[in-house]
Amino acid sequence: MQAMTAYDWPGNVREMINRIRRAVVMCEGRLVCPMDLGLVDGFVAKDVMSLADARNVAERQAIENALQHCRFNMSKAAKTLGVSRVTLYRLLAKYEIGFDDSSMVS
């Protein structure tokens, strides 16, 4: 809350709404922190990424999380992500996500 009240919000309410929506989608923990909002000590983070880059980061993270959650079972991971196995394999190639036998949980 301190970071949000310290920030000037030049984009007004629209900027705040957009930052909160993005933070809710992108945050890794249960709570949204200033870094998730792109605010560090009340200032905007310097590394602004394009929407396409943000989507790629989010998509890659979702794939990696699903794989770990499903213990690298491709069928279960694909179902969790709401895509076909073929699409999951295509996305693995797109993001160059690979794993070896040591990363698989037995």
Image (cartoon, grey):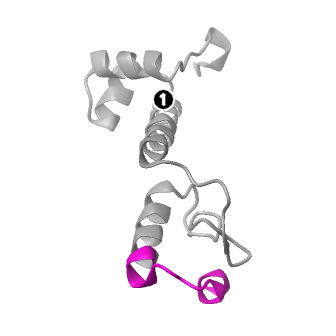
Magenta span: helix, strand or loop, mainly? helix
Q: Seen in the image, is 63 located left or right of residue 8? A: left
Q: Residue at x 49, y 36 (%)?
A: 69
Q: Residue at x 48, y 29 (%)?
A: 67
User: How many discs appear?
Assistant: 1
Residue extending farthest to the right is 41
Whether the magenta-drawn stretch holds residue 73 is answered as: no
The residue range painted magenta reads 1-15
Residue extending farthest to the bottom is 5
Q: Is residue 47 above or below residue 21?
A: above
Q: Position of residue 88 (x, y in %)?
A: 35, 22
Q: Is residue 26 above or below residue 38?
A: above
Q: Secondary structure at mark 1?
A: helix
Q: Residue at x 50, y 64 (%)?
A: 23
Quarter of the image that includes the N terminus? bottom right
Residue extending farthest to the front is 10
Q: Nearer the viewer, residue 79 or 55?
A: 55
Whether the magenta-drawn stretch holds residue 2 is answered as: yes
Quarter of the image that includes the C terminus? top right
Q: Residue at x 57, y 55 (%)?
A: 28
Q: Position of residue 50 (x, y in %)?
A: 48, 48
Q: Position of residue 63 (x, y in %)?
A: 45, 33
**Dot 1, crowdedness within 10 Å: few (<14), some or many (≥20)?**
many
What residue did someone put label 1 on? 67
Q: Position of residue 84 (x, y in %)?
A: 25, 23
Q: Nearer the viewer, residue 65 or 58?
A: 58
Q: Amino acid at mark 1?
A: Leu
